[in-house]
Image: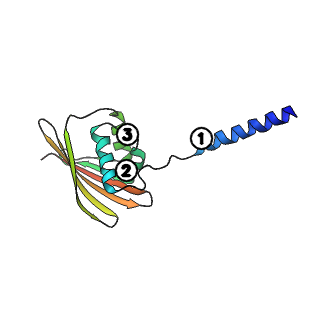
């Protein structure tokens, strides 16, 4: 009897541990406003915060830098951000939503450094998983 109880207890523990490994992380950005997604993008780019990058970018994300014509897809850009995890840029950051209509949003983020200014034009799209950054174009006016 004791052996049977031990076996059953071990089976229950194994089943519960397997299901916890298989559990998908919930999307913390699913039910938030577009402004929260923009703030999360700015935290990723200027403060090195990469914890929510999995949920932040659309699958077809595109990044382009108009100064040197570099372009990156989601995998390349998130790898870049991950390599700079924890790096804090010394800049003043602000943003404004230029337009939001339906499931599309366009924002302008300005990062003012000591010797230059960086402007990101951010396009967001909304789907069943919430707002996602789908395109960023960086300029240096």
> Residue beneath label 1, please?
21
> Residue beneath label 3, please?
50
Q: Residue at x 57, y 46 (%)?
A: 23
The correct choice, above or below, for 104 with respect to 134 in the image is below
Q: Determine whether, in the image, residue 138 is placed left or right of residue 133.
A: left
Secondary element at tag 2: strand
What colour scheme does the image use? rainbow
The span from disc 2 to disc 1 (Cα, nearest Å) is 24 Å
Closer to the N terminus: mark 2 or mark 1? 1
The span from disc 3 to disc 2 (Cα, nearest Å) is 11 Å
Closer to the camera in the image, 59 or 68: 59
Secondary element at tag 1: helix
Closer to the N terminus: mark 3 or mark 2? 3
Graded by Cα atoms within 10 Å as few (under 14), some (14 to 19) or many (20 or more), the crowding at tag 2 reads: many
Give residue 123's position: percent from left, percent from top: 28, 56
Give residue 92's position: percent from left, percent from top: 19, 40
Graded by Cα atoms within 10 Å as few (under 14), some (14 to 19) or many (20 or more), the crowding at tag 3 reads: many
> Residue beneath label 2, please?
57
Residue that sits furthest to the right in the current view? 1
Graded by Cα atoms within 10 Å as few (under 14), some (14 to 19) or many (20 or more), the crowding at tag 1 reads: few
Closer to the N terminus: mark 1 or mark 3? 1
The correct choice, above or below, for 94 with respect to 11 in the image is below
Q: Residue at x 74, y 35 (%)?
A: 10
Secondary element at tag 3: loop
Give residue 63's position: percent from left, percent from top: 29, 49
Closer to the camera in the image, 79 or 19: 19
Q: Residue at x 39, y 44 (%)?
A: 53
Q: Residue at x 29, y 32 (%)?
A: 87
The span from disc 1 to disc 3 (Cα, nearest Å) is 22 Å
Q: Determine whether, in the image, residue 115 is placed left or right of residue 124.
A: left
Residue 9 picture quarter: top right
Give residue 51's position: percent from left, percent from top: 40, 40
């Amino acid at each position: 009897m004791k052996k049977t109880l031990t076996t059953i207890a071990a089976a229950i523990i194994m089943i519960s541990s397997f299901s916890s490994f298989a559990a998908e992380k919930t999307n913390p950005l699913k039910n938030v406003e577009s402004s929260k997604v923009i703030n999360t993008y700015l935290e990723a780019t200027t403060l090195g915060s990469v914890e929510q990058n999995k949920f932040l970018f659309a699958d077809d994300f595109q990044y382009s830098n108009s100064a040197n014509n570099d372009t990156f897809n989601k995998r390349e850009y998130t790898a870049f951000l991950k390599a700079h995890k924890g790096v804090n840029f010394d800049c003043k950051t602000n943003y404004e939503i230029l337009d939001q209509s339906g499931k599309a949003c366009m924002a302008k983020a300005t990062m003012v450094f000591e010797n230059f200014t960086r402007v990101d034009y951010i396009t967001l799209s909304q789907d069943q998983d919430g707002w996602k950054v789908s395109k960023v174009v960086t300029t240096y006016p």
